[in-house]
């Protein structure tokens, strides 16, 4: 009986670690069911072997090594990251189990029953239930794993969890050794509530950290949106001034051209006409898709692409009335175009095409760019080549969130050296829609 409960406890612990990797850390899984089966069967074998081992140090080392091997077998992440995540989760789960062990140990004392392995198994089952519930809630609320919060914050959180485990252990020791009376049932309930409160506290800390980091990222996007608007209106203002100046001088230019034509100075006439055409073309180099904020973003990145020697083609238009709010438009276009430029700059052909289309109820945006294959799409997964990879995951996740908010769809297609992303957004009027989200259809007209 002891061997069975021991093995089941180890298997449940591995299950909790996998759940946390999937739902909380959101590690990239290898899409093979056989890998999962092999890992759990291997855990059964390892656990049976460790059950008969006397040295706790050997048990600990073998278990950690086996855990790291299993994670590398299950997930498509960098090996050193998997080792760090695996060890961190192991200690966190161990502290969580330890708190519930104290709870069930007190209960078994009250029932005059003693079975260490059964206590550990019940504690493991109870913590598994909590981990499953917390993981599901977290995954439904956030699209970014807690690995994005950074190592320092994880270590500080670990210290907090360790302190909580120490407090629970001390409290359990006091209740078991120093209390005598008829109200142990009440104290047991209070102890249970204390542990649940600590679990809620730890969960709240993680949620607050993630919420703060997510808010910071969205605040950056908001600031980017405002800056793009300011630049766009400055550009329009400057263009209007240049147009007025040219219009003021147009009669003089016409007189000069007329004089040259009468004097048959055709060579000078052609040169002068070329200069005028250059000025006219400069007035018309503003790209517009019939939406103010999108125009601002496209023109910014268009200028950047031209400076980097990238050929850009923009075709199509937005509808006159756009129900997609400016925040989401900025999120989508700024991330899509910045990624396209970064990829196209490294490619041989250096080309980007952007197509905007619409129907009565939808807006479709198709962006294609060339890229140089540097392993970005290994195992059908987009891998960032940026140095700040820890925070780069926000880009694609923010695009997905914006698409979901507008009842849309996102599709990515990779063929040879061409990357294509198709985004469809719902363009139907929403309840309590802010009027400001509709006015961007004619800003640049």
Image (cartoon, rainbow, N blue to C red):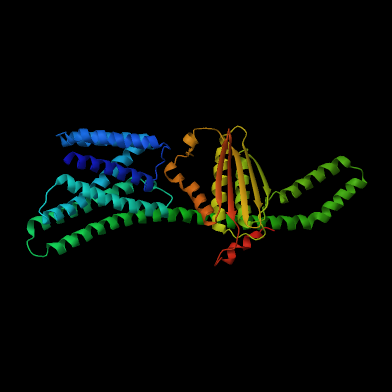
Displayed quadrant of residue 197: bottom left
Return the x and y of residue 341 as percentages of the image width and height: 57, 41
- Residue 72 at x, y = what percent? 35, 35
| Position above or below: 83 against 176 | above
- Is 340 left, or right, of 213 in this rendering? right
Q: Quadrant of the C terminus?
A: bottom right
Q: Does residue 76 appear in the picture of this structure?
A: no
The N terminus is located in which quarter? Answer: top left
Q: Count the marks: how many? A: 0
Choose between 326 and 361: the one closer to the eye.
361
- Residue depicted at x 25% and y 44%: 91
Looking at the image, which is closer to me, 89 or 80? 89
Image side of residue 28 versus residue 91, left or right: right
Residue 384 coordinates in the image, percent (x, y): 47, 39
Q: Residue 427, percent across and down?
A: 60, 58
List the single residue furthest toward the front: 1
Q: Is residue 378 left or right of residue 67?
A: right
Which residue corresponds to the image point at 83% horizontal and 54% vertical from the top-left?
A: 252
Q: Residue at x 33, y 43 (%)?
A: 18
Residue 134 visible here: yes
237 and 114: which is toward the camera: 114
């Amino acid at each position: 009986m002891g061997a069975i409960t021991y093995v089941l406890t180890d298997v449940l612990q591995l299950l909790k670690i996998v759940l946390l990797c999937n739902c909380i850390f959101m590690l990239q899984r290898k899409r093979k069911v056989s890998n999962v089966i092999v890992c759990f069967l291997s855990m059964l074998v390892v656990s049976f072997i460790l059950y008969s081992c006397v040295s706790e140090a050997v048990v600990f080392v073998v278990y950690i090594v086996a855990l790291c091997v299993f994670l590398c077998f299950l997930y498509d992440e960098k090996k050193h990251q998997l080792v760090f995540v695996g060890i961190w989760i192991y200690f966190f789960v161990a502290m969580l189990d330890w708190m519930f062990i104290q709870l069930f140990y007190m209960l078994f004392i009250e029932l005059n029953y003693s079975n260490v392995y059964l206590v550990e198994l019940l504690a493991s089952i109870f913590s598994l239930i909590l981990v499953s519930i917390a993981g599901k809630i977290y995954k439904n609320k956030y699209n970014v794993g807690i690995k994005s919060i950074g190592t320092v914050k994880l270590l500080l959180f670990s210290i907090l969890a360790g302190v909580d485990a120490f407090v629970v252990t001390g409290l359990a020791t006091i209740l078991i050794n120093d209390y005598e009376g008829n109200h142990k049932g009440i104290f047991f309930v209070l102890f249970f509530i204390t542990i649940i409160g600590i679990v809620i506290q730890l969960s709240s800390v993680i949620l607050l950290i993630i919420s703060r980091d997510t808010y910071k990222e969205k605040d950056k996007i908001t600031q980017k949106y405002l800056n793009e608007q300011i630049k766009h209106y400055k550009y329009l203002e400057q263009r209007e001034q240049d147009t007025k100046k040219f219009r003021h001088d147009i009669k003089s230019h016409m007189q000069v051209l007329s004089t040259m034509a009468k004097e048959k100075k055709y060579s000078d006439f052609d040169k002068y006409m070329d200069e005028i055409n250059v000025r006219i073309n400069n007035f018309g180099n503003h790209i517009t898709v019939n939406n103010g904020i999108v125009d601002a973003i496209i023109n910014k990145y268009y200028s950047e692409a031209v400076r980097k020697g990238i050929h850009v083609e923009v075709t199509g238009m937005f509808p006159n009335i756009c129900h997609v709010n400016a925040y989401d438009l900025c999120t989508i276009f700024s991330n899509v175009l910045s990624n396209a430029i970064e990829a196209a700059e490294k490619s041989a052909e250096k080309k980007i095409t952007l197509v905007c289309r619409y129907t009565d109820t939808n807006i479709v945006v198709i962006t294609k760019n060339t890229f140089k294959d540097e392993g970005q799409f290994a195992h059908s997964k987009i891998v960032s080549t940026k140095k700040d990879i820890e925070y780069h995951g926000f880009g694609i996740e923010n695009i997905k969130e914006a698409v979901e908010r507008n009842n849309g769809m996102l599709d990515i297609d990779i063929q040879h050296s061409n990357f294509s992303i198709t985004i469809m957004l719902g363009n139907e009027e929403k309840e309590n829609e802010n009027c400001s989200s509709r006015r961007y259809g004619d800003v640049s007209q």
